[in-house]
Image (cartoon, helix red, strand yellow):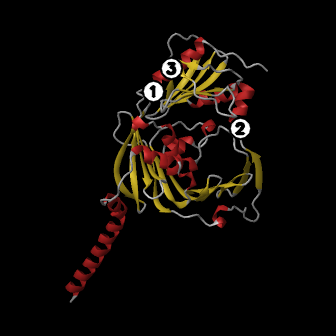
Amino acid sequence: MVSVLRRLATWRWAAVAIGALALAVLPTAVGAWPVAASSPSPDVLLARVRSSATVAFSGYAEANGTLAVPDVPQLGDLPALLGGTTRLRAWYAAPDRWRVDTVKPAGEDGTYAATGGTWLWEFDPGRATLVTGEPPVRLPRAADLLPPDLARRFAAAAGPDELRSLPPRRIAGRTALGLRITPRDLATTIGFVDLYADAATGLPVRVAITPRDATTPALTAGFLDLRLAAPDRVLLTFTPPAGVQVTTTAAPDITALVDRFAPYMLPTALAGLARRDVVAGVPRGVATYGTGFGLVAVLPLSADVAHGVLRRLSGPPAGPLKLDGVADFEGSTIATPLLNAVAVRLGRRFYLVAGTVGEAPLGRAVAALAANPPPRRPT
């Protein structure tokens, strides 16, 4: 009798273990199930992705990055966003009505798009901030890693000859159509971008960005749970908890700082790269160069900010800047498989030059700025 009971107990625990294992592998297994779906042409799917900002949804997503970016205060949350796992709960009704919570071990920090500004709620230490306005240039935030936003940024730069279809998949319980974007620009660090969009609505549900000459993505973002319906308005409304001090501040306008500290007229071409169209509201002291996915951005820095950045970039994973033919300079480089940057002093001027290109194109851009210093804008 005792041996029978022992055998029953053994089988019972075995059943529990098998059940736990099944739950662990279920999402992967479901994602691998064959999917019957008729895919539109790549250009049609790309157009649906680009126009998906009107699709309402709510869900849970995770973004994973493997890029080692130095922890420099001037970069905000960028190092954590690109070099770790970001867990996001999202409720989206429209481009100007949404909420994204960043899930952390100690609680959830929330970002709410509202009339008149954006609410920021930090669970620990219990702080609420209303940020009024939206600057034309800002640092990345966790909400930018949601698959729809991330995918539309890449879709906007893709050309018709850079597209091909991928087999459909099941993602977050829905049939998703696949699209691979392979940049034709050989100077870019991006090898290819895989996008998956909901077959019914065109809403992007997964993005994977793989560097050139690599086989595994350096940055991925995907939904694990998704509901395609307008979220309850109550979920999009933030009311500060009782007893919490509320701070109201204007959105930090990076371009205003550029106007104040580095009012230069950056050239229309730099190291053989044409300047992109000037964006409304962004002064000519900020410029981006290149076409498609081969982007080089130039941002003049004030002396105090630049000295702080250069000090923080004195060791790994950053390294010293090597620049031939330039006498009076000091600088550091940030090198990752996808994003590279140079912080440099050229005489009495300071620049941050960054982009989705290799270190050599960035070095040529810095050398061009040294050889032909941009003139100051007339006051």
What amino acid is found at the position of numbered circle 1 in the picture? Gly
What residue is shown with label 3?
363
Quarter of the image for residue 36 reads bottom left
- Mark 3 packing: few (<14 Cα in 10 Å), some, or many (20+)? many
What amino acid is found at the position of numbered circle 2 in the picture? Asp
What residue is shown with label 1?
358
326 sits to left or right of 245? left
Distance between the Cα atoms at labels 1 and 2? 29 Å
328 sits to left or right of 334? right
Q: Nearer the viewer, residue 293 or 201?
A: 201
Mark 1 vs 2: CB contact within 8 A: no
Distance between the Cα atoms at labels 1 and 3? 9 Å
Q: Residue at x 50, y 37 (%)?
A: 157
Asked if residue 316 can be seen in this view, the reply is no
What residue is shown with label 2?
253
Quarter of the image for residue 305 reads top right
Q: Residue at x 32, y 66 (%)?
A: 21
Q: Nearer the viewer, residue 46 or 140?
A: 46
Q: Position of residue 250 (x, y in %)?
A: 75, 44
54 sits to left or right of 208? right
